[in-house]
Image (cartoon, rainbow, N blue to C red):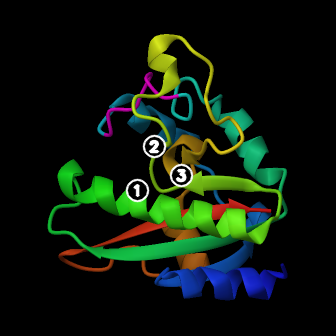
């Protein structure tokens, strides 16, 4: 699948926006990592794809930069309170499922970076001391990678702050 086909397929699947960029143009902010420890999402320490178990900031950055290109995907949702997990969780799940569908359809090797921590298993196998059930499909979120999402969105010509009552979620397929 060509880059242009990948881009068109993302839009056909229902993403509000999609754009291609070089991964070397991403900005990584190690200062974001402590935000994960605040555990607002509830996945810190109980999900292989999330800190502290996903890898160091340097390891995560290296995983992204292993791939020269990225398809950035955005979805927009009518959500009153972006901090309300009851509202955001289903939207993030849908966004990540669409991202995974696109990657699987592409048949291309690469790395998925989600809009939330991996939700393939509930609970994650880490909670039972078992190995990851889907290591080839597991994905970490933008925050775990310390990607400066606002900067990425701007470079892709996408709105980061969509105004009151609208929340944008972002994911990437690095290839």
> Which residue extends farthest left?
80
Q: Is residue 8 above or below residue 163?
A: below
User: Pointers 3 and 2 in contact (CB under 8 A)?
Assistant: no
Q: Mark 3, residues whose alpha carbon is within 10 Å: few (<14), some, or many (≥20)?
A: many
**Depth order, front residue of 130/110:** 130
- Residue that mark 2 sits on: 119
| Residue 66: percent from left, percent from top | 84, 50
* Residue at 75 percent of width and 63 percent of height: 23
- Mark 3 vs mark 1, foreground winner is 1
| Residue 163: percent from left, percent from top | 25, 79
Does the magenta portion include 44? yes
| Residue 168: percent from left, percent from top | 38, 71
- Residue that mark 1 sits on: 93
The magenta stretch is 41-47
- Residue that mark 3 sits on: 142
Q: Quadrant of the C terminus?
A: bottom right
| Residue 52: percent from left, percent from top | 53, 24
């Amino acid at each position: 699948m060509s880059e242009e086909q990948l881009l068109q397929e993302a839009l056909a699947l229902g993403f509000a926006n999609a754009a291609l960029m070089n991964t070397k143009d991403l900005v990584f902010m190690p200062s974001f990592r402590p935000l994960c420890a605040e555990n607002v999402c509830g996945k810190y320490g109980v999900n292989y794809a999330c800190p502290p178990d996903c890898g160091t900031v340097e390891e995560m950055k290296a995983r992204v930069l292993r791939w020269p290109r990225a398809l950035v995907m955005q979805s927009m949702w009518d959500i009153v309170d972006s901090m309300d997990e009851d509202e955001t969780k289903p939207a993030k799940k849908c966004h990540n499922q669409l991202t995974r569908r696109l990657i699987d359809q592409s048949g291309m090797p690469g790395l998925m970076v989600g809009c939330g921590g991996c939700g393939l298993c509930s609970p994650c196998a880490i909670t039972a001391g078992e190995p990851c059930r889907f290591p080839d499909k597991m994905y970490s979120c933008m925050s775990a990678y310390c990607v400066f999402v606002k900067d990425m969105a701007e470079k892709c010509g996408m709105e980061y702050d969509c105004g009151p009552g609208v929340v944008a979620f972002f994911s990437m397929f690095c290839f």
